[in-house]
Image (cartoon, grey):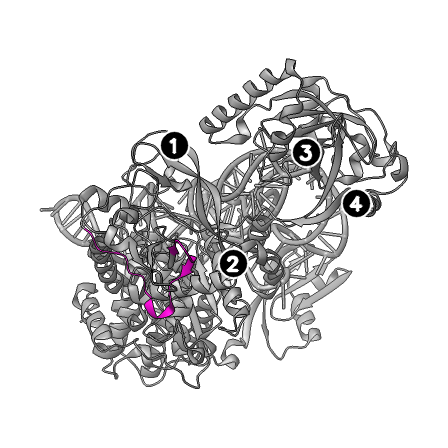
RNA sequence: GGUCGAGUGGUGGAACUGGCAGACACGUGGGACUCAAAAUCCCAUGCUAGCAAUAGUGUGAGGGUUCAACUCCCUCCUCGACCACCA
């Protein structure tokens, strides 16, 4: 009588035991075992509950954690909450309740969900970025950055919603309308805290060589950092003492320049504004206004038409000596280079389009392939590649690279410019004019200026209030809370005011992996003993969307902590992988508005935890996107039910000794499951179990082999494995504390196997070979084949290849 | 425009380091059980021809290297992700 698979009978039972026995908690203290720190991106506890994507990723990594533990590693698999964030604040304003309460409720329900999945997180290490005992240290690290001169205040433009009277993050602005209220946002300059991440740009780039990230992730970060060598060259403005500094990355094309374009809001333009001839002034001013209006409307600059206006002023190219008209144009970005660009239409497509539109000349100075010097008269002909330089005075005959070097030397000798490395990465705007974030621990004193809050006064706690309205001035809502804002200067004791800006949600997540190492420490952010033991993170699993922001930010913070001598390693994460996403049916993103959101709860209710988890792993490869399909979960459901019954039934009918074929089959399964999990090939690991079942479900097993099968099952179907182990087999709790079987390599080498024989590239027969067969013996077996109507021995063989244990290839 | 990546049955996807393409699953067709249905079980299932054994053909297209190519090289096409008026 075989047991029916009914997950409700035992899944909850084992979870209760795992978590009440603190099965995974505190197990991973310092010890002599090799450590393995497995990190997953912690969730933002949002109202609607956990996304199925979280369930998938955490389940996959749970299999890794369980396998590594069984293999004798001291595994840390922690979880926590990235709890500060705008959605909660917005929701809190709407329902007029403090975000603390809402966050705690959300965390409560997330925790319940995660536990109901039977994930083997170490709950004793749980962190919450919005908890004062956590953000105390986030503030402390901020003060370290401040002391090091890496945090400064600067005027920065922000998106401002005039209706809500708040600054909004880019994510909140949809088609230049404020997401919350639909009002058009404005740009406003506000004094903001900024972190000097650019000071670390070079190291963030170079040290990517030290870590094991996917190539795509490295490329993404390198691109984002965007390191380039620029040549800033001063041109004399005609008829004045002013100079105009243009920047270019292609100084070899200087002699092809025919105009200069500057950005409408550049400093340069302000300087030369008064020199614009009277007849042109009005037109230029009109144009600038127009561009600003357009810029507000357009979300995508790329689509805007390229326009420009001639200022009436000329400058002299100090390399070529040419007289160039100065134009103002909408496509020049102030933030790139000096905000002034030299136009070389023959060798830049955009310059060519601009030149054609406004009738500016095109001069070719770089040879094409085979010395092509033909005139350029269409966009397709624009030659952007490097080549030999001609028509270029003192650069003639040089290669592009040679010309670059020569120009670089020239401008430095003549003191008319400089060679400078610039980055696309800009300093990190770190202030938010919002309530629900870590208060920036700075006090503004009328006599002492900015004074950091003394360490002993940390944390600067967020005041808990029932409601908080936005301010008239655009300051954070904290500015209205008088009790909180007004304080004494720690230096002179006079009346002073607190900084009312808070930190962005990226702050807490920039160092949480360190806090996990020592989450209860109230003396330090992490003890050196703990971080030296656990760091680096051996594997960091997460989404692609966090590669350029979160991952880069946390690498930056880590390097600062390293420079301060507070951590041992230069890089926090030894390896990183990127998961695919779970999409709704039809390959679209799951979203509330489409009503296609699948949560784990209903799946667990219907199929149980092991089936849900196994299905999420089986759907597709780890790194690929997978489309949700309600139908195909049935296949996994069928399998798991059969498999459970199989293990139970076989246990009742076990024999003295299983035969060799069974032993080899189990050994293969063991090897497949182990290697696949370690390689993150969870889909084929599950397929391995299915294949094993299909082949061996009717074979006889002895008890040792059945136990081995249960052990192999444990990382992938943890509840079933525990139930079989304890209830069916009567073994000691818990299977997850057992040792993983060691692969017997001898069993994996097959003694007698059938291999194909290819004749002229086509499979024409099969022969049995054994390990001991010599090539001559194989040859004999092949020659006796009679697949072509006559024995092969009667046909002349040109070539004979035997790949041991694989294939025989014969050419006639 | 840039960067990274991907094209394999009706579908999701397997295939070690170049060694029997299509594992595993879904779906579909047929059968068993049932008064019937659901569930379950069994058989078949890349395509073409054939009752069949079998033969031919087949991994986006075309070429190349090799005894042997989904895999390596060249040319082209298509799709996706991220970034982007980056000079």
Q: CA distance from mark 1 to mark 4?
A: 44 Å
Q: CA distance from mark 2 to mark 1?
A: 30 Å
Q: Residue furthest top?
A: A279
Q: Which residues are magenta?
A: A444-465
**Label 1 SS:** loop
- Return the mark for residue A150: 2
Q: Nearer the viewer, mark 4 or mark 2?
A: 4
- Return the mark for residue A185: 1
Callouts 1 and 4 on one subunit: yes
Residue drawn 48% across the image and 59% down it: A577
* Contact (Cβ within 8 Å) of mark 3 with mark 1: no
Q: Is residue A742 above or below residue A469?
A: below
Count residues near mark 2 (Cα–Cα under 10 Å), then give few for <14, some for 14-19, many for 20+. Answer: some
**Label 2 SS:** loop
Q: Is residue A757 above or below residue A230?
A: below
Q: Is residue A369 above or below residue A477?
A: above
């Amino acid at each position: 009588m075989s047991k029916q698979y009914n997950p409700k009978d035992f899944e909850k039972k084992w979870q209760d035991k795992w978590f009440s026995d603190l099965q995974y908690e505190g197990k991973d203290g310092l010890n002599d075992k090799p450590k393995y720190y497995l990190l997953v991106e912690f969730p933002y506890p949002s109202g609607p509950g956990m996304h199925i994507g979280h369930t998938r990723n955490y389940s996959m990594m749970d299999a890794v954690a369980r396998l590594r533990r069984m293999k004798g590693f001291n595994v840390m698999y922690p979880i926590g909450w990235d709890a500060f964030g705008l959605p909660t604040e917005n929701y809190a304003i709407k329902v007029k309740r403090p975000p603390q309460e809402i966050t705690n409720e959300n965390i409560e329900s997330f925790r319940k969900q995660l536990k109901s999945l039977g994930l083997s997180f170490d709950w004793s290490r749980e962190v919450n970025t919005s908890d004062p005992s956590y953000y105390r240290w986030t503030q402390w690290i901020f003060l370290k950055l401040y002391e090091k001169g890496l945090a400064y205040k600067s005027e920065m433009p922000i998106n401002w919603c005039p209706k809500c009277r708040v600054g909004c993050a880019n994510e909140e602005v949809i088609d230049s309308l404020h997401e919350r209220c639909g009002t058009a946002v404005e740009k406003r300059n506000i004094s903001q805290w900024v972190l000097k991440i650019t000071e670390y740009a070079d190291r963030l780039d170079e040290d990517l060589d030290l870590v094991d990230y996917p190539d795509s992730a490295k490329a993404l970060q390198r691109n984002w950092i965007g390191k380039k060598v620029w040549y800033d060259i001063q041109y004399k403005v005609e008829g004045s003492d002013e100079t105009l500094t243009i920047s270019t990355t292609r100084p070899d094309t200087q002699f092809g320049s025919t105009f200069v374009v500057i950005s409408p809001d550049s400093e340069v333009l302000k300087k030369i504004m008064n020199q614009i001839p009277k007849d042109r002034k009005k037109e230029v001013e009109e144009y600038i206004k127009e561009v600003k209006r357009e810029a507000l409307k357009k979300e995508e600059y790329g689509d805007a038409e390229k326009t420009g206006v001639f200022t009436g002023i000329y400058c002299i190219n100090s390399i070529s000596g040419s007289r160039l008209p100065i134009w103002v144009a909408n496509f020049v970005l102030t933030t790139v280079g000096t905000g002034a660009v030299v136009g070389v239409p023959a060798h830049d497509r955009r310059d060519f389009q601009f030149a054609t539109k406004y009738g500016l000349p095109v001069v070719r100075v770089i040879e094409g392939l085979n010395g092509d010097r033909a005139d350029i008269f269409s966009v397709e002909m624009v030659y952007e590649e490097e080549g030999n330089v001609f028509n270029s005075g003192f650069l003639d005959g040089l290669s592009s690279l040679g010309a670059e070097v020569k120009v670089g030397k020239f401008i430095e000798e003549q003191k008319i410019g400089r060679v400078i490395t610039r980055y696309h990465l800009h300093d990190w705007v770190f202030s938010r004019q919002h309530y629900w974030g870590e208060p920036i621990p700075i006090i503004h004193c009328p006599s002492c200026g900015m004074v950091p809050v003394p360490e002993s006064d940390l944390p600067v706690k967020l005041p808990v209030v029932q409601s908080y309205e936005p301010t008239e001035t655009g300051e954070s809502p904290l500015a209205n809370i008088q009790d909180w804002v007004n304080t004494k200067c720690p230096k002179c004791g006079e009346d002073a005011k607190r900084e009312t800006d808070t930190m962005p949600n990226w702050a807490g997540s920039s160092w949480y992996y360190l806090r996990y190492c020592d989450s209860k420490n109230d003396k330090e952010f992490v003890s050196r003993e703990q971080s030296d033991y656990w760091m680096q993170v051996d594997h960091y699993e997460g989404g692609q969307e966090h590669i350029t922001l979160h991952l880069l930010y946390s690498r930056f913070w880590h390097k600062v902590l390293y420079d301060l001598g507070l951590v041992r390693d230069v890089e926090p994460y030894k390896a990183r992988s990127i998961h695919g996403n779970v999409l709704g049916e039809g390959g679209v993103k799951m979203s509330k508005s489409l009503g296609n959101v699948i949560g784990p709860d209903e799946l667990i209710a219907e199929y149980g935890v092991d089936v849900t988890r196994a299905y999420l792993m089986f759907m597709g490869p780890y790194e690929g996107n997978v489309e949700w399909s309600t139908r195909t979960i049935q296949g996994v459901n069928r399998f798991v039910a059969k498999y459970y019954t199989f293990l139970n039934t076989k246990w009742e009918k076990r024999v003295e000794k299983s035969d060799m074929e069974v032993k080899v089959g189990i050994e293969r399964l063991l090897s497949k499951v182990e290697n696949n999990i370690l390689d993150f090939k969870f889909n084929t690991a599950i397929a391995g179990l299915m294949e094993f079942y299909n082949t061996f479900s009717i074979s006889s097993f002895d008890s040792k082999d059945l136990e081995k099968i249960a052990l192999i099952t444990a990382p992938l179907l943890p509840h079933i494995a525990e139930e079989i182990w304890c209830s069916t087999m009567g073994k000691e709790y818990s299977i997850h504390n057992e040792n993983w079987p060691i692969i017997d390599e001898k069993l994996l080498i097959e003694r007698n196997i059938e291999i194909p024989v290819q004749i002229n590239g086509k499979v024409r027969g099969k022969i049995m070979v054994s390990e001991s067969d010599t090539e001559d013996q194989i040859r004999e077996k092949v020659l006796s084949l009679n697949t072509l109507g006559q024995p092969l021995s009667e046909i002349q063989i040109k070539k004979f290849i035997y790949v041991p244990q694989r294939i025989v290839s014969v050419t006639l």
